[in-house]
């Protein structure tokens, strides 16, 4: 197997742990909207798509009001609570040292995403940082991924043979990888509930960042 020509990463819960902040911000939003909150397990199971794609279904005509509450809550705490997942520092630096172009494609608001990348001092490692709202449509539609690859200077021909990888922790990440003919790589400790990846299966499943770095180094 050839080493990757480039790698696109998801962000939340692929390279950084943000579940506690998302959980707290969502529950503040639910409370403001007069709705019961979610457990952390419910948040983990249901948060996949971008806010503009998910909030209308959750809050109906009040989704923009809910958006403002969520963003206010999230902005108060997302940088101070930002936690790098074990091995993510070594992964990012190790891949960059091998000369592999890296990008991020996330369903987090682009403004919040870029603040978090900058907060960690990782700007220099990523040739593109694309978040929700930056492209015409968000993951799993391919527009955001195409924007990232174009910014990185990765031509369509460079994707042949699935030479470009998409690494993430959710079915949305695997779906965009298939839509763009990229190599779908799942990174998380468990394989998820039965059926989660039936329509868009990963080509490889690795437990964590350390395992991914070892896998790349072996190719």
Image (cartoon, helix red, strand yellow):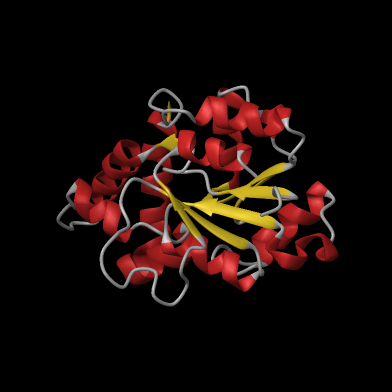
Above or below — where is 150 with respect to 24? below
The residue furthest bottom is: 199
Above or below — where is 210 with respect to 167? above
Above or below — where is 86 with respect to 47? above
Q: In terms of depth relative to the viewer, which is nearer, 10 or 25?
A: 10
**Residue at horizontal 45%, vertical 58%?**
51
**Residue at horizontal 63%, vertical 26%?**
93
Image-quadrant location for residue 128: top right
Image quadrant where one finds the C terminus:
top right
Q: Position of residue 193 (x, y in %)?
A: 26, 64
Q: Position of residue 203 (x, y in %)?
A: 52, 63
Q: In terms of depth relative to the viewer, which is nearer, 27 or 66?
A: 27
Above or below — where is 189 with respect to 45? above
Q: Is residue 14 left or right of residue 163?
A: left
Q: Position of residue 84 (x, y in %)?
A: 45, 28
Image-quadrant location for residue 121: top right
Image-quadrant location for residue 54: bottom left
């Amino acid at each position: 197997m050839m080493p990757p020509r480039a790698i696109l990463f998801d962000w939340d819960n692929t390279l950084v742990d943000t579940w506690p902040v998302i959980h707290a911000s969502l529950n503040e939003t639910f409370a403001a909207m007069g709705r019961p909150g979610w457990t952390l397990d419910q948040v983990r199971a249901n948060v996949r798509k971008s806010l503009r794609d998910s909030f209308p279904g959750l809050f109906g005509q009040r989704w923009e009001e809910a958006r403002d509450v969520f963003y206010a809550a999230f902005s108060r705490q997302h940088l101070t609570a930002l936690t790098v997942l074990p091995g993510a520092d070594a992964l990012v630096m190790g891949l960059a040292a091998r000369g592999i172009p890296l990008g991020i494609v996330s369903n987090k608001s682009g403004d919040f995403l870029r603040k978090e990348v900058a907060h960690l001092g990782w700007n220099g490692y990523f040739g593109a940082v694309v978040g929700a709202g930056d492209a015409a449509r968000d993951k799993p539609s391919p527009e955001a991924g195409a924007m990232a690859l174009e910014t990185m200077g990765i031509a369509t021909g460079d994707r042949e043979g699935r030479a470009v990888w998409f690494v993430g922790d959710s079915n949305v990440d695997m779906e965009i990888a298939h839509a763009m003919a990229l190599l779908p790589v799942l990174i998380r400790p468990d394989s998820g509930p039965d059926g989660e990846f039936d329509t868009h299966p990963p080509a490889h499943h690795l437990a964590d960042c350390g395992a991914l770095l070892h896998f790349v180094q072996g190719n």
